[in-house]
Image (spheres, coloured by chain):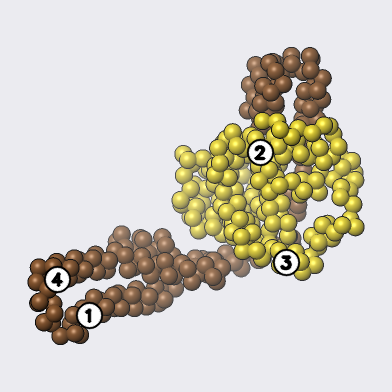
Amino acid sequence: MNCKDARKVMQDMLARTATAEQAAILKGHMMECTRCGHLCDGLTETAELVSRLRNPKVSAEFDEAFAVRLRAAQRSPLEAEPRRLQVLIRAAAAVKHLAWPWIFVLGASVIIFVELQAQSPQKIESLPPLSKINMLAMLAIMTIVTAITRSMLESDLSFTSVFRRLMK
Amino acid sequence: MSELADEQLASNAAKGDQNAFAELYERYKASAVGFAHSFLRCRSLAEDAAQDALISVYLNVRQFNAEKGSFKSWFFAILYHRCRRETRRGLWHWRRSGGTEEMAEMNENTPRYRLDIDTGIDIRAALEQLPGKHRTAVILTRIHGLSVRESARVLGISENNVKQRVFRGIADLRNMLGKGTSTRGAK
């Protein structure tokens, strides 16, 4: 074993993954190499010091504050999240509402629209402007408004609850 | 105190056993605050992050799968990500500059390592000087007793990487505490 190998075994030793065989080989090397012996002793001693550290005591208010927050979280999982994240979650949930039924409808509409335009552009051009442009726009707006309204109305909104509801 | 393993308690908590969750809470609250404190270096933020993680456990304990790893690694992974999110938000910078108790420790006039009655050195203060990724690996494996595999799961890195970080962290601590020569360059 050379010094480089010895350091690899020391790594394993500090991670508590060294085998008895590796430890014996390292010990043999340390008898010959005082530098590695000194390093290994220092590392072991330092690791022992770190292992002796204990967690600080929690404050007296910790349990009470936790109970208050837990009650709020039980009422609504969303309330347990930071305010900024709540907005993101609501937006994401709205997209989820949007995703399953409406994206299918939107996609189908786009395909029909493109297909129709490709086959007979004059038919599209002959349509009144409102029907031509607003067909997709109205559908998109309705979709977004519905999704957002639904998400805002549901106070217990979360990714999992939305998913479960959709699965039902 | 119950003799049940964490995984069994988590399973009971998932079935709605409030006492099982209370037991897990008692077991983990101190280590959660300790870990978060070493990460965020602010007591109030650490307690917030610990509470967040414990609430997350309460709400999502059904998602815990013992086949994928221990409860401890699952819990610390949640806590670790809470702490990282808190760090990213940068709030702790603001709090620290607001003159909290931690500022006294970081003050230049304060001795870098104070003498400790038991050990003769303040290992905790030295630990705080380590780079974040080394410090986290050392704390998880040496203080909270996670295995290399569990730590790798928490940190989202390979087991070899955990070993290297622990080795480097301990080696740096040893150098800081004046216990030997430099190990820079060691692999």
**Same chain shared by disc 4 and disc 2:** no
Q: Amino acid at mark 2?
A: Arg
Screen quadrant of the C terminus of chain B:
top right
Q: Amino acid at mark 3?
A: Arg
Q: Secondary structure at mark 1?
A: helix
Q: Is residue A52 visible?
A: no
Q: Residues within 10 Å of mark 1 (few under 14, many from 20)?
A: few
Q: Nearer the viewer, mark 3 or mark 4?
A: 4
Find disc 3 in the rendering and name its residue.
Answer: B95
In primary-sequence order, the first of circles 1 and 4 is: 4
The residue depicted at 79 percent of the width and 60 percent of the height is B102
Find disc 4 in the rendering and name its residue.
Answer: A117
Q: Secondary structure at mark 2?
A: helix
Q: Nearer the viewer, mark 1 or mark 4?
A: 4
Q: Residues within 10 Å of mark 2 (few under 14, many from 20)?
A: many
Q: State the image quarter where residue B42 is shown.
A: bottom right
Q: Which chain is yellow?
A: B
Q: Secondary structure at mark 4?
A: helix
